[in-house]
Amino acid sequence: DRRGCLDRARESQMTAPPSGLVPYLLRTVKVGVRATFLTVAALMAFLVLPRETEVEVATYVALLVVALAGALAVAFLPWDQLFRSGAGMWALYVWSAGDIVLISVAVAISGGANSPLFVLYALTTVFFAASYPPRAQLALLLFTFACFLGASAVAGDIMVAEMVTRMAIIAILTFISSFLTFELANAEQALGQLRQSRLLHDHALEINDNVV
């Protein structure tokens, strides 16, 4: 069916996206880099403003430096060439996985399962749900779960109800973001076909008028 065809098309984009998708992915990278800069700024404010949560300051600052350096490196990569060579998607996957690891370390040093920084997982989740094919989304979702469980274990804060609830929220967010992205792409495709049909119809009418 139509959805199945689109899903298979998205699966084929695991490594080499079609040329028509490259501009979207390039814009996605730019948005991701800007979002990282804004997130680092917000996390720096979290460190200096009055707060109840205790954090390991040295480790926290090191995480911010690594995140900022990573975003700068990503910003200067030749993404157009990478996407057209088939390496771009893998570079995106590595970037997302690295961000998830950084978030998990931040969670581990700020309370584990009860960390207020858990919400940062929402950023990486929306990003990969809106940009990656289904199998990559599933892999990164499971990776997020594993990292969150590891962060909670390191913090010594294994609270089953809270952890299950939070992981369920991330899973639901993945589903909603992926579904809306799919529906938007589907709607844009249908709109493009409608415009093309109208152009063909208008052209046929013009030819008919000229003949008459």
Image (spheres, rainbow, N blue to C red):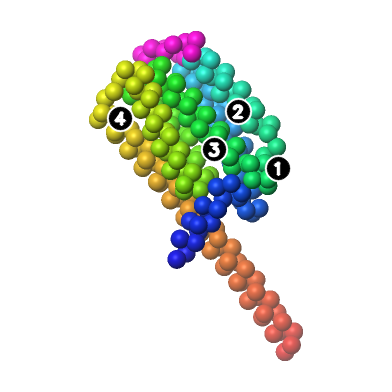
Badge 1 vs badge 3, beta-carbon distance below 8 Å: no
Residue tagged 4: 163
Region rendered in magenta = 47-59
Q: Earlier in the sequence, mark 1 or mark 4?
A: 1
Q: Is residue 165 left or right of residue 128?
A: left
Find residue 131 and report its horizontal and vertical position in percent.
53, 44
Q: Is residue 206 left or right of residue 130?
A: right
Can you say which quadrant of the picture contains the N terminus?
A: bottom left
Find residue 91 and report its horizontal and vertical position in percent.
60, 37
User: What's the magenta bit mostly, secondary-structure-wise?
Assistant: loop
The circle on residue 81 is: 1
Q: Earlier in the sequence, mark 1 or mark 3?
A: 1
Residue tagged 3: 93
Quarter-of-image position of residue 78: top right
Regarding mark 1 in the picture, which secondary structure is present there? helix
Whole-angstrom CA distance, mark 3 to mark 2, is: 14 Å
Q: Residue furthest left?
A: 161
Q: Is residue 188 above or below residue 201?
A: above
Residue tagged 2: 71
Residue at 30 percent across and 20 percent down: it is: 157
The amino acid type found where label 1 is placed reads Gln
